Image (spheres, coloured by chain):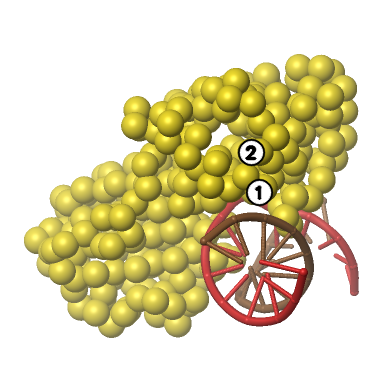
Chain colours: A yellow, B red, C brown
DNA sequence: CCCCATGTTCGACA
DNA sequence: GTGTCGAACATGGG
């Protein structure tokens, strides 16, 4: 599930536990999600401290630990964060549970494509310090987008929009939604696009990110029927704009749904 | 049994 | 360095 809006939604689920005294930590230390994390260090470090504040960038979450430390979580394909009572008993897929006086903050992920990383010191992790410009940042402007498109002249637009180094937070459904709203064929390459199309793409990038933050990040509301979102998941869907059948193809290994003729 | 999945990474190759 | 492709990872649903 987790793309830009879903990640922000999950970030907020741990808010009740912010500033709360951490009492103990449960972790499935052998789970793949801890491949690059020192679980022993994490288990020793957290008790007695607290999660002071949280951030997201693209698909990653970052929790600042007070007085020192940083916890990074990537939700992968099936990861999620939940807040439960402090009496909660960890289930099979709850790889990390942080207990406070009142809450249990759980990270669970049955497919284990997610990642947890931890740094005990006070400087923010490298990935945070080197993060790319966010799409909703005003500095993500026409000039900035154009430079990215010109750097990858022959990469299909669908593939390009999913590059996290350049379009942080865009996943499969958002990429399809953006291209559909921009009336752009997902197989088209930057070298085939006019500057006018660049403009439209920039607008739709911003629009879909803003919509995701408004609808998904805020209470995970059901997206309206006029989005592509509701129609793209199975074969046999109908384009809300043209009323004609949607098509589903593979582009570089990823299922892509688009509206033929509408998207050129 | 088959195929599919809102993700990332790695290796092979042109 | 760009770009494509397939496999791998792990689990569940249809």
From this view, report whether residue A33 is shown above or below residue A262: below
Q: Are marks 1 and 2 on the same chain?
A: yes
| 10 Å crowding of disc 2: few (<14), some (14-19), many (20+) | many
Chain containing mark 2: A
Task: Say whether residue A212 is visible.
Answer: no
Q: Earlier in the sequence, mark 1 or mark 2?
A: 1
The foreground one among A264 and A215 is: A264
Could you tell me which secondary element the residue under label 2 belongs to?
A: helix
- In percent of width and height, residue A46 lies at 20, 69
Chain containing mark 1: A
From this view, report whether residue A214 is shown above or below residue A109: above
Q: With A88 as the anchor, is A160 left or right in this view? A: right
Q: Give the residue at x 54% y 66%.
A: A113
Q: Give the residue at x 46% y 52%.
A: A165
Residue occupied by mark 2? A190
The foreground one among A151 and A240 is: A151
Q: Kindly give the residue lying farthest to the left in the view shown.
A: A67
Q: Give the residue at x 43% y 31%.
A: A143
Q: With A65 as the anchor, is A29 left or right in this view? A: right
Task: Say whether residue A244 is visible.
Answer: yes
- In percent of width and height, residue A12 lies at 34, 42
> Which corner quadrant of the image does residue A126 belong to?
bottom left
Q: Give the residue at x 72% y 55%.
A: A252
- In percent of width and height, residue A130 lies at 31, 55
- In percent of width and height, residue B6 lies at 62, 50
Q: CA distance from mark 1 to mark 2?
A: 7 Å
Q: With A257 as the anchor, is A159 left or right in this view? A: left
> Which corner quadrant of the image does residue A140 belong to?
top left
Residue occupied by mark 1? A155
Mark identifier at residue A163: none
Q: Are marks 1 and 2 in contact (CB under 8 Å)?
A: yes
């Amino acid at each position: 599930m987790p793309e830009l809006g879903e990640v922000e939604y999950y970030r907020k689920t741990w808010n009740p536990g912010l500033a709360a005294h951490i009492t103990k930590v449960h972790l499935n230390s052998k789970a793949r999600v801890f491949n690059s994390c020192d679980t022993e260090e994490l288990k020793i470090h957290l008790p007695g401290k607290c999660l002071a504040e949280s951030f997201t960038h693209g698909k990653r979450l970052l929790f600042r630990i007070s007085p020192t430390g940083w916890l990074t979580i990537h939700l992968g394909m099936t990861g999620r964060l939940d807040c439960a009572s402090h009496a909660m008993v960890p289930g099979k897929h709850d790889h990390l549970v942080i207990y406070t006086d009142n809450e249990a903050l759980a990270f669970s992920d049955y497919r284990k494509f997610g990642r947890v990383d931890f740094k005990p010191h006070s400087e923010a992790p490298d990935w945070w310090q080197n993060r790319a410009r966010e799409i909703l940042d005003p500095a993500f402007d026409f000039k900035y987008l154009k430079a990215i498109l010109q750097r990858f002249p022959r990469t299909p637009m669908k593939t390009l929009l999913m590059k996290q180094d350049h379009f942080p937070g865009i996943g499969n459904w958002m990429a399809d939604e953006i291209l559909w709203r921009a009336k752009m064929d997902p197989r088209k390459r930057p070298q085939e696009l006019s500057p006018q199309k660049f403009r439209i793409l920039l607008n739709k990038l911003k629009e879909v990110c803003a919509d995701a933050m408004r609808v998904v990040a805020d209470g995970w509301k059901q997206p309206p029927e006029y989005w592509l979102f509701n129609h793209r998941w199975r074969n046999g869907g109908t384009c809300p704009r043209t009323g004609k059948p949607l098509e589903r193809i593979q582009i570089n290994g990823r299922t892509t749904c688009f509206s033929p003729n509408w998207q050129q």
